[in-house]
Image: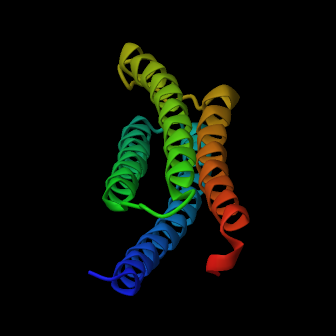
Amino acid sequence: MNAITILSAMAERETSFNTAFDSMKQELAHAKSSVDQAVKEAINANEMKCNIEAGKKYDEWKAELTEVRDKLRQFELEKKTLEVDVGDRDKKVTDLEQRVLQLQEEAQLAEAKFASREVELRIEGRNQFVASAEADGMLKEFTKKVFSMGFTLACDHLVKNPDLY
């Protein structure tokens, strides 16, 4: 293989990675919108004290959280398949790995907060759903952090690779 073929293959891989990354950003934005909508609906459910609706919203939030975690895992798999052997690209991969580790830590913190909310709902026996400002704040904070980390990752990538765009 000559250098042109190798560079061409690397460019194709990077283009594929960037496309997948852009798709992930769009899906995270959609997930944020869905979570925001779910929070609004949960507040309405609280006002009506509707136990059945509370259980459904809980399941939707849990599904949204699972979806975000799955997207993060998919992103990690995409990142691992990107092999770079030219110049300082190893450092860029290391930077991406650090960002993924930060995202994982944020996701674990959010999962712990979410698990505590799950325990609270089980203790109440789902008899009444009282959405507290803290629970809403945690969900919004998680959504903002996930979206922010994805946006920060994209910005860092753009700043470090201005010649690629």
Identify the residue at horizontal 69%, vertical 62% (top origin).
160
Give x and y (percent) for residue 154: 63, 62
Identify the residue at horizontal 54%, vertical 65% (top origin).
25
Describe residue 17's horizontal placement relative to residue 130 as left or right.
left
Quarter placement of the N terminus: bottom left
Above or below, comparing residue 135 to residue 63 in the picture: above
Give x and y (percent) for residue 9: 35, 80
Q: Give the farthest residue toward the front.
A: 2
Above or below, comparing residue 10 to residue 47 in the picture: below
Q: Nearer the viewer, residue 91 or 26?
A: 91
Q: Nearer the viewer, residue 29 or 163?
A: 163
Above or below, comparing residue 87 to residue 18 in the picture: above
Quarter placement of the C terminus: bottom right
Give x and y (percent) for residue 23: 46, 72
Q: Give the farthest residue toward the top.
A: 123
Q: Nearer the viewer, residue 12 or 90?
A: 90
Give x and y (percent) for residue 24: 47, 65
Describe residue 56's horizontal placement relative to residue 138 as left or right.
left
Q: Give the farthest residue toward the left.
A: 1
Q: Quadrant of residue 98?
A: top right
Describe residue 62's horizontal placement relative to residue 145 as left or right.
left
Identify the residue at horizontal 68%, vertical 77% (top origin).
163
Identify the residue at horizontal 47%, vertical 22% (top origin).
112
By what rule are the colours in the image chosen? rainbow
